[in-house]
Every structure is written in C-alpha cells, then in structure tokens.
Image: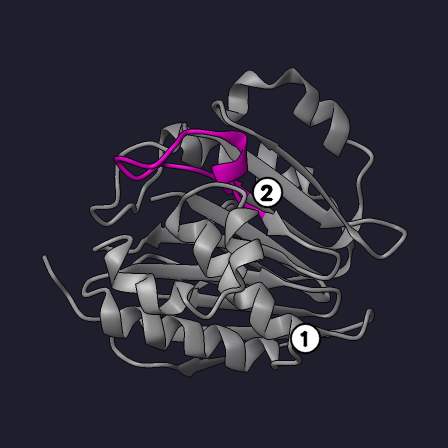
Amino acid sequence: MCRHVAYLGPPSAPAEPVLHAPHSLVVQAYAPKDMRGGGTVNVDGFGVGWFADDGYPTRYRRAGPIWTDPALERMLRPVRSTAFVGAVRSGTVGMPVTEGACAPFADDDWLFSHNGVVLGWPESVAGLAEEVPVVDLLRLDAPTDSALLWAWLRRALRGGADPVDAVRELVRRVAATSRGARLNLLLVGRSVLVATAWSHSLWSRSAGAGVLVASEPCDEEPGWRPVPDGGLLVARSDGASTTCEVEKIAQPERTE
C-alpha cells in the first residue's frame, strides 16, 4: 500500500531519494522489499511536494507509474528544499486511479501522505467525516480514505491544533473504528515532520544536519533505524540542526 519518503533539515535535493538512490522511490514502485501484505507494486500514481523558496509548498502529481514521466527528473534537478515529501501509490481495490488520489496532499502550510488503508471504508470512518465541513468534503481531491484523513487533519490544523497531537489523535481514532487499519502517515511543515508507523514499515536516519524518513531505506548509507510498529516520529528543524524523537502511540491490532 504505497511507499513514501520525507526530509526535513538544511536544503537538500529531493531527486536523490525519489529518483537516484539505489533503492529510490522509482525502484520501490516496481520492486519494494517490505510491503507486509499491502500489495506487490506501487504503480497507480506518484507525487512529489517540496517547500519552495517563497516558503510555500510546490507539488507535482500524476496517475501513472513514476518511471513513465520524463518531466519529473527535469523538474527536480534544480530543486533544493528544506522539507519535502515523495510518494508512489498502490491503489486500494475500489478506489479511483486518478491524479487527485495521489499523495502528497497539500495546502499553504503542509504536505501529507498516507501509506496504508482504512478497512471498512467508508462506514468505519463516517463519524470522522461528520466532523469535516460539508464544503471540504465536496472539495476532496478524490473519494478515498487518504483524502478524508487529510481533510480531517487539515481542519484540525487550521483550528489551531498542535500537529503532533493532531496526528496522534487521528491514528487513535481511525484505529478504534477501523479494525486492522494501516496508518503510516507523514505530515511535513516548514520546520516539523511527523510520521507514524502503524502496521507498515518505516525507517529513519540522519542526513547531515537533517532527517530522512522512508518506508524502506532508499540508500546504503549507515544509520538507518526502523521506527517501531505503533511509533510516532517527530523531527524539528531550526534550519541549522534537526532533532528527532520517537514515542509509542499504541500497539496496532493484527488481523492477519
């Protein structure tokens, strides 16, 4: 169910983990190593988002396999960013294969990605949807579980919620109503990165003065560490250095 990568720290090139690393997102699209029962390939779309020089996110998404788009490498070649997200998608059966269904989702302040699936969709999260303004529901990027999770999270953030608290609450609430849900979430802002490991693999390593987080290690650099299942990783950057901490939310329920 998808693969994603995120970075926070001093300016860095998203093209490296997305396109050029030995186990880049391109490779993880057709030869992932650790899908844990969540599909076999990730060819139903891709997206890359980064905070540009003006301080706002720029995003590029397409519905096809990531290796089929010749424009992506040309677009990413000059990019250096302090925060970015990349994702390749394995669509859930019954959900559309469209550009709007691809991560990262975005607004003026955040980039968001969901690696996983909400089981029992849509009934299992109907209560969550009731808390999202109707206009926001009508404007969902796509009729998918990931888009709804983003709509709820965006509403919370715009209401002043702390990003770490909001992500933690979202995982707990969805896990309580969707038994066996897979909820690896990435939320990236200008100076904070929040990631969860919930029934899918997640790894992190220091990248110079920054932090790199990925579904699977995308290079052979030393220092990759798995985020424990049920874990929540929080990285914060002041532009010169980046801190990273991991806490336990809970133990995900197994259905297999």
Return the residue nearer the eye: 251 or 170: 170
Residue at 54 percent of width and 43 percent of height? 141
Q: Amino acid at mark 1?
A: Arg
Residue beneath label 2, please? Answer: 17
Return the residue nearer the eye: 136 or 6: 136
Q: Quadrant of the N terminus?
A: top left
Identify the image's colour scheme: rainbow, by chain, secondary structure or one colour: one colour
Return the residue nearer the eye: 192 or 207: 192
Q: Is residue 255 magenta?
A: no
Q: Amino acid at mark 2?
A: Pro
Residue at 75 percent of width and 65 percent of height? 190
Residue beneath label 1, please? Answer: 236
Answer above or below: position of 45 versus 238. Answer: above
Q: Is residue 89 magenta?
A: yes
Q: Is residue 226 left or right of residue 238?
A: left
Residue at 52 percent of width and 82 percent of height? 165
Extreme residue in the left direction: 256
Query: Helix, strand, or loop for circle 1?
Result: strand
Answer above or below: position of 177 versus 40. Answer: below
Residue at 58 percent of width and 49 percent of height? 105
Q: Position of residue 162 (x, y in %)?
A: 61, 81
Extreme residue in the front direction: 134
Q: Position of residue 155 (x, y in %)?
A: 58, 68
